[in-house]
Amino acid sequence: MEQSTLRGCRDASRRLVAARPPATFAAPESPEPTGDSRVEPVVLIVTVRNEARTIGPLLDSILAGTRVPDEIVVADGGSSDGTLELLRSRASADPRIRAVLAPGNRSVGRNAAVRASTAPIVACTDAGVEVEPDWLERITRPFAADPATEVVAGFYLPVGRTRFERAAGVISAPRLTEIDPKRFLPSTRSVAFRRTAWERVRGFDESLAHNEDTPFALALKAAGARFHFEPEARVRWHPRGDLRSFFRQHRRFGFGDGESRVQGSFYARLAAKYALGAILFVGGFWYRDCWAALVVGVLLFVTTQARRGAGKLGPYGRFILVPFLKVVYDAAYLSGYAQGRLSRLSSPGRPLRDRDSPRASD
């Protein structure tokens, strides 16, 4: 029953995942940002929908960074709060900014943004995140350091204002020490890739409305793309602030895994662990040793989750809230995954290859 947790920035995106066939990974390095004439032009792409409150601060932070993108393309998925009008106003004042109307899911928007740009390097983040001043420079430097690099996976840090948000961040994102660079899949909160790699896998799968970054990263790995993990290319994001939105977000991520048919072995093992707990509970009515084993498993689970919250939360948050949210998180993913698989059975669309890879939270 004991397991460590991850999510996948997309959110999670956001994930520690082994892929078949294995992609080549560069050893992670963190060079200090400096000017380099070998750095190729870069476009920053962002997808938005009703982000009038957050898109301005994001653009301001990007333009104030240590490296400014040569192009910024923002794809609007059909905002009704004035986001597109704000973007067009910014674009009229700054020729580097371009607004693209792309109704549909995030895959549609990301592909439209890439097609509307010309730069050979594509950096990607999300509205609502806070990029560090050197994020763009750090996430693009590996392409200059090693021209064979095709994908750079950046890092993302949860920022919580309340105890619930801090606990949700513990559950939803890995600590840097928990990451295996060879297994880490980037989130679209913090990733950069070569246009040629995007073309090779035919972009993001537009049939997937949820959690599209994982299938995209797995497709790149399957195509043999060379990845580089850059831990210093960091963005910050705010986890969900209440139980309902937390559950719905991660159920949506699980749905995305189900509809794209990824992570099957992970979900099978996760379901088996909870099934084992249920069997031990029921078996305890006949064999008390089953209850003893269940208690040991629960204690190991609680202490493991509490350890992940060390330094971020007090005793209540670590020993009660974090383990509780981990159970909610798992339930959300399992239910979402089942719904996603069923949705493919009822509306199969175009064929998808099964990509079966374990998660770090397993």
Image (cartoon, grey):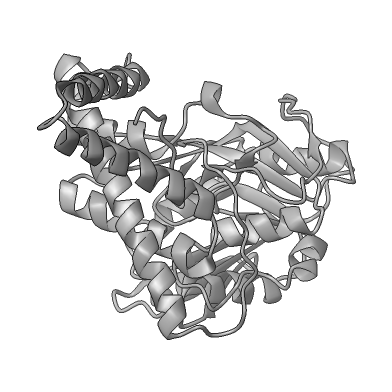
Image spot of residue 5 (x, y percent): 41, 34
Question: In terms of image quadrants, where is residue 133?
Answer: top right
> Seen from this angle, which residue lies furthest front?
286
Left or right of 213 on screen, residue 159: left
Image spot of residue 131 (x, y percent): 50, 42
Left or right of 42 on screen, residue 272: left
Question: Would residue 9 be visible to someone looking at this image?
Answer: no
Image spot of residue 199 (x, y percent): 78, 70
> Seen from this angle, which residue lies furthest left?
285
Question: Would residue 282 be visible to someone looking at this image?
Answer: yes
Q: Nearer the viewer, residue 280 or 225?
A: 280
Q: Is residue 75 above or below residue 296?
A: below
Q: Is residue 102 above or below residue 219?
A: below
Q: Is residue 154 above or below residue 264?
A: above
Q: Nearer the viewer, residue 287 or 261?
A: 287
Q: Nearer the viewer, residue 52 or 187?
A: 187
Q: Is residue 1 above or below residue 242?
A: above
Q: Quadrant of the N terminus?
A: top left
Residue drawn at point x = 49 percent, y = 46 percent: 266
Residue drawn at point x = 62 percent, y = 59 percent: 355
